[in-house]
Image (cartoon, helix red, strand yellow):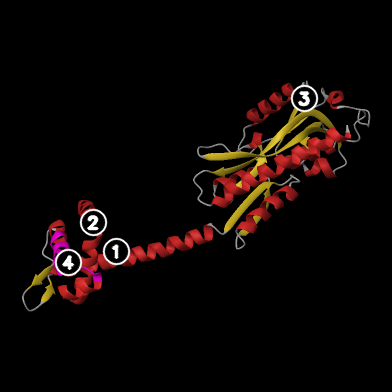
Amino acid sequence: MKNHYYELMAVITLINEASVRCFLTLCETLSFTETAKRLYMTQQAVSKYIVKLEEDIGFKLFTRTHHYVMLTKAGENYYALFERLRKELAEMAEETRRYYAKLLKTLRVGYLEWLEISDSVTESLKKIRRENPEMKISLEKYPQQELNNLFFERKLDLIITYAEFSPKGVGIKKLKAFETPLVLLVSPDDPKAGENASANDFRREPFIKAAAASETLSESRNRAKRQCRELGFTPSEIIISPNLESAYMATELGQGVLVSTMLSRMSLHSELMCYPVGRSEELQCFWHEDQENPAVEKFAEYLNQYNAQTEKLYGRTKEVRQ
């Protein structure tokens, strides 16, 4: 059966498109004269294409006399085959058209649930919408592990998260979305907390770190140790929380200190004390390079451009104030 299939495909690849067109038209008209008229050819050209097709296939397709033209059994079989293929190709073309019509009118963006980035994201999405008025845009927020899972399941076209939580794998593209200052979050009940305190006052406090998606305890602990070294912290203990929400809660309860960013909703709206640590963190856009919707990469570029302009403007404002 397989050999027959490969033989058939080999024959089809050899067949000239004009030959098939002549064959199908002649099947309908059973007249070389009428076929030539319909295809704007000479009768000799039609005859040559039919002879070439018969040579490629290896069977006589028509019985020709001075009085009539009729299909042979082979002709009937190949007519049914070409008609079936033509129908299947038309159905496939329509199915493909519907797929791309839906694909090119949908953009699904996900981001880490604790991030306060709606203004910047909204501005970039508005630009996409102006270029594609019919596009349906979905903006969704999830915990880190679910965010990565949905990304790998192709249920989100693009995600925004911290560089340290970047999804790992082949064929993933990324682009900087934001750069935000890192801050140390401390419970207001901590005895050392106050307006005159600094991050350095808490460098020996227990250090809380949220585990990343699909990360082992050992990997989370090593990531926490690496960040402590970068910040010059020598904590009495490293506490790994199962997720970001648990990490914030542990900090509020005074169980330790937590490094976060100024784009974190908890940093902006909680009662936790915030102390700059003199470093910044990148948030990045991630998408699969084999996705075919141009709006995905465009959105990442617009977000990058928007925030680059905002950071530049913010820097100028700081210089003027100083």
Give the dominant element type of the magenta stretch: helix, strand or loop. Answer: helix
Residue placed furthest toward the bottom: 67
Q: CA distance from mark 4 to mark 2?
A: 19 Å
- Dot in front, 4 or 3: 4
Question: Which numbered disc flags the more N-terminal residue, 2 or 1?
Answer: 2
Question: Does residue 56 appear to the left or right of 212 in the view shown?
Answer: left
What residue is shown at x 49% (from left), y 58% (from top)? 100
| Residue 180, percent from left and from top | 75, 36
Image vertical order of residue 16 relative to residue 196, above or below: below
Secondary element under disc 3, as helix, strand or loop, is: loop
Q: Which mark is residue 237?
A: 3
Report which quarter residue 206 is drawn in: top right
Q: Amino acid at mark 4?
A: Val
Secondary element under disc 1, as helix, strand or loop, is: helix
Q: Are marks 1 and 4 in contact (CB under 8 Å)?
A: no
Secondary element under disc 2, as helix, strand or loop, is: helix
Q: Which residue is mark 2?
A: 12
Q: Is residue 231 magenta?
A: no
